[in-house]
Amino acid sequence: MPEEIYNASGINIFGKRLKSLVFSTDLAIIKNNNADGVIAVYPFTPSNIH
């Protein structure tokens, strides 16, 4: 992570201070970083077609 992240104030969520987040669905990216949290969303739009 960039040095600036360690100087940031961050946000508190459930008593834990988060300063860095990763937004990805790629497991290799999620595994190979030192972010405080991960935001992962399902990459496809749900459809009602049966």
Image (spheres, grey):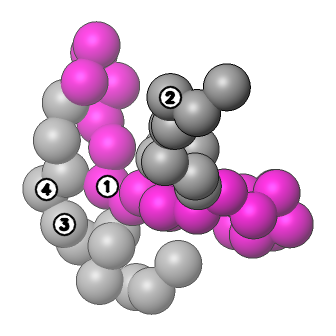
Residue 25 visible, this orientation = yes
Give the quarter of the image for residue 50: top right
Q: Which residue is mark 1?
A: 19
Q: Confirm or deny contact between disc 3 and disc 1 (CB under 8 A).
A: yes
Q: Depth check: 12 or 22 in front? A: 22
Q: Which residue is mark 4?
A: 9
Residue 45 image offset from top left, x and y in percent:
49, 48
Q: Confirm or deny contact between disc 2 and disc 1 (CB under 8 A).
A: no
**How many residues crowd around disc 2 within 10 Å: few (fewer than 14), some, or many (20 or more)?**
few
Q: Which residue is mark 2?
A: 48
Amino acid type, label 4: Ser
Q: Which residue is mark 3?
A: 8
Of the numbered discs 2 and 1, the one sitting upstream in the chain is: 1
Report if residue 28 lies within the magenta region: yes
- Which residue of the protein is positioned furthest toward the top in this rendering? 14
Real-space CA distance between mark 2 and mark 1, rounded to the nearest whole angstrom: 38 Å
Q: Residue at x 58, y 52 (%)?
A: 44
Real-space CA distance between mark 2 and mark 4, rounded to the nearest whole angstrom: 43 Å
Image height check: is 17 above or below 26? above
Q: Residue at x 50, y 61 (%)?
A: 22
Real-space CA distance between mark 1 and mark 4, rounded to the nearest whole angstrom: 7 Å
**How many residues crowd around disc 3 within 10 Å: few (fewer than 14), some, or many (20 or more)?**
few
Secondary-structure class at tag 1: loop
Q: Confirm or deny contact between disc 4 and disc 3 (CB under 8 A).
A: yes
Real-space CA distance between mark 3 and mark 1, rounded to the nearest whole angstrom: 7 Å
Residue 13 image offset from top left, x and y in percent:
25, 24
Amino acid type, label 1: Lys
Secondary-structure class at tag 4: loop
Q: Residue at x 19, y 66 (%)?
A: 8
Secondary-structure class at tag 3: loop
18 left or right, relative to 26 = left
